[in-house]
Image: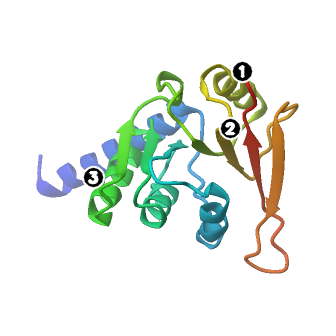
């Protein structure tokens, strides 16, 4: 096999692994818009010692932005798709944020009982139901769930909605759900 064939084989394998990763996690990669990061940081409103999880952190842009804005909080990004995890982990290391960890982990295998805030982007109806059950079972009272774009139906706790303001046509909603006594 010559060098050109090896390069093509490598590209094919990388593409294949990436596609299988996205199929395996049942979620395509759609990053949070950079223009909404300021609003997300404002809504997160973390205090020193708070723990923030980003579920399905993709390229870790939210985790990195939150880690830089709140250096005394602990930030944990979870990603299950292998190529995205490696990308996020590399970006996190290069960011220099000492309060940031990126884990290659299924979001349903991570106990969230220490979370003060959880960020999610993209909840299909079936995922919404599973996550809602997980949040109710694991999150402590007064923990906040920050949901980008998608809403959580029938939430029994406090709910606030914020609108994105990138431009006049921006209809993006960021919903914050607060856990009441479990």
Q: Which residue is mark 2?
A: 142
**Would residue 120 be found to the left or right of residue 101 on screen?**
right
Q: Nearer the viewer, residue 156 or 121?
A: 156
Q: Nearer the viewer, mark 1 or mark 3?
A: 1
Q: Quadrant of residue 4?
A: bottom left
Check disc 1 and report its element: helix, strand or loop.
Answer: loop
Which residue is at a point 77% across and 74% down the rendered structure image?
A: 165
Counting residues from the N terminus, which is met first, the one under dot 1 or under dot 3? 3
Number of numbered discs: 3
**Would residue 133 be found to the left or right of residue 82 on screen?**
right
Q: Which residue is mark 3?
A: 8
Q: Residues within 10 Å of mark 2 (few under 14, many from 20)?
A: some
Q: Where in the figure is residue 181, as x and y percent of width and height? A: 73, 25
Which residue is at a point 72% across and 27% down the rendered structure image?
A: 132
Counting residues from the N terminus, which is met first, the one under dot 2 or under dot 3? 3
Which residue is at a point 42% across and 48% down the rendered structure image?
A: 74
Q: Residue furthest front?
A: 48
For the residues labelled 1 and 3, say whether their Cβ atoms are less than 8 Å apart: no
Q: Where in the figure is residue 12, as x and y percent of width and height? A: 34, 46
Counting residues from the N terminus, which is met first, the one under dot 2 or under dot 1? 2
Q: Residues within 10 Å of mark 1 (few under 14, many from 20)?
A: few
Looking at the image, can residue 146 be seen? yes
Q: Quadrant of residue 32?
A: bottom right
Q: Is residue 159 above or below residue 154?
A: below
What is the C-alpha distance between the residues marked 2 and 1? Answer: 10 Å
What is the C-alpha distance between the residues marked 2 and 3? Answer: 52 Å
* Mark sitting on residue 158: none
Looking at the image, can residue 15 be seen? no
Q: Where in the figure is residue 40, as x and y percent of width and height? A: 64, 61
* Mark sitting on residue 182: 1
Check disc 3 and report its element: helix, strand or loop.
Answer: helix
């Amino acid at each position: 096999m010559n060098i050109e064939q090896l390069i093509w084989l490598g590209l094919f394998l990388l593409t294949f692994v990436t596609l299988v990763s996205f199929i395996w996690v049942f979620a395509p990669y759609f990053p949070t818009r950079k223009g909404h990061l300021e609003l997300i940081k404002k809504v997160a409103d973390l205090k020193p010692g708070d723990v923030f999880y980003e579920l399905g952190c993709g390229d870790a842009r939210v985790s990195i932005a939150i880690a830089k804005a709140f250096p005394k909080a602990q930030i944990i990004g979870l990603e299950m798709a292998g190529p995205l995890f490696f990308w996020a982990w590399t970006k996190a290391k290069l960011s220099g944020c000492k309060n940031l960890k990126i884990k290659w982990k299924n979001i349903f295998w991570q106990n969230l009982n220490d979370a003060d805030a959880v960020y999610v982007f993209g909840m299909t109806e079936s995922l919404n139901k599973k996550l809602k059950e997980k949040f109710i079972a694991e999150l402590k009272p007064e923990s906040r769930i920050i949901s980008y774009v998608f809403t959580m139906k029938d939430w029994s706790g406090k709910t606030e909605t914020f609108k994105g303001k990138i431009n006049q046509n921006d209809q993006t909603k960021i919903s914050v759900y607060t856990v009441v006594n479990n």
